[in-house]
Image (cartoon, grey):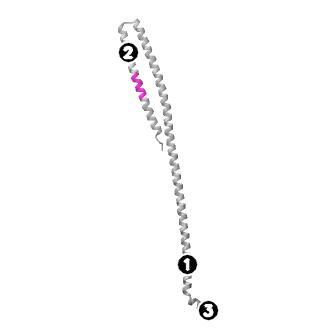
Amino acid sequence: MTVKILIELAWRYWHWFVIAALVVIITALSIVYVQRGYAIDAIKAKHELVLATERADYESSARQIEQQNYQGVINAVNQSTVRQKQIADKYDSVVVINDSLSDSIANIETSLISANRSAVIDYTKSVNGLFAECSTQYLAMAKSAAREQEEARRLREAWPKR
């Protein structure tokens, strides 16, 4: 008898059973939908993390490359400064040698003045003047060439290597 009553109640309230079943199905689907949304959010968060990590790695390597290039330029400039100092020292020693030669020629001229005729004196003066002019121009040219060579070397060494 209880089974018969249950069947009658089921026939009478079948639409409530359908509604309850639909509510259960809709609830289950909404739970699945929300879980998938969380899964998508988790995937997006993981993707953002990977992107941030890659970006940080890229910026770090770019900074390292920039630092290496900067250090290369600094080293090249420091080495250039040392070489310029060496060039200046060599130039100063050449000037001293040049002055010594000029003094020697002047001494020779003085000794020729007292010992020889005026033609020898004129010749010595001409040679001395010519030598002084040539050595001055030669020193200026050598200094300029050394400066240009040093500038080219500094630029070549400072240029980033691949």
* Residue 127 disc label: 2
Cα separation, mark 3 vs mark 2, equals 144 Å
Main SS class of the magenta portion in the image? helix
Mark sitting earlier along the chain (3/2): 3
The quarter in which the N terminus is drawn is: bottom right
Q: Residue furthest bottom?
A: 1
Mark 2: secondary structure: helix
Mark 3: give few (<14), some (14-19) or many (20+) Cα within 10 Å: few
- Is residue 3 rendered to the left or right of residue 106? right
Q: Amino acid at mark 2?
A: Val
Mark sitting earlier along the chain (2/1): 1
Tell me the mark number nearer the camera, choosing from 3 and 2. Answer: 3
The one nearer the camera, 36 or 147, is 36
Q: Residue at x 38, y 20 (%)?
A: 133
**Magenta region:** 136-144
Q: Which residue is mark 1?
A: 25
The stretch drawn in magenta includes residue 121: no
Cα separation, mark 2 vs mark 1, equals 117 Å
The stretch drawn in magenta includes residue 140: yes
Q: Is residue 46 above or below residue 130?
A: below
Mark 3: secondary structure: helix
Mark 1: secondary structure: helix
Q: Residue at x 49, y 29 (%)?
A: 85
* Residue 65 disc label: none
Q: Which residue is mark 3?
A: 5
- Is residue 7 rendered to the left or right of residue 102? right
Mark sitting earlier along the chain (1/3): 3
Query: x, y (%) of residue 23?
Result: 55, 79
Q: Is residue 138 above or below residue 113?
A: below
Q: Residue at x 49, y 32 (%)?
A: 81
Q: Amino acid at mark 1?
A: Ile
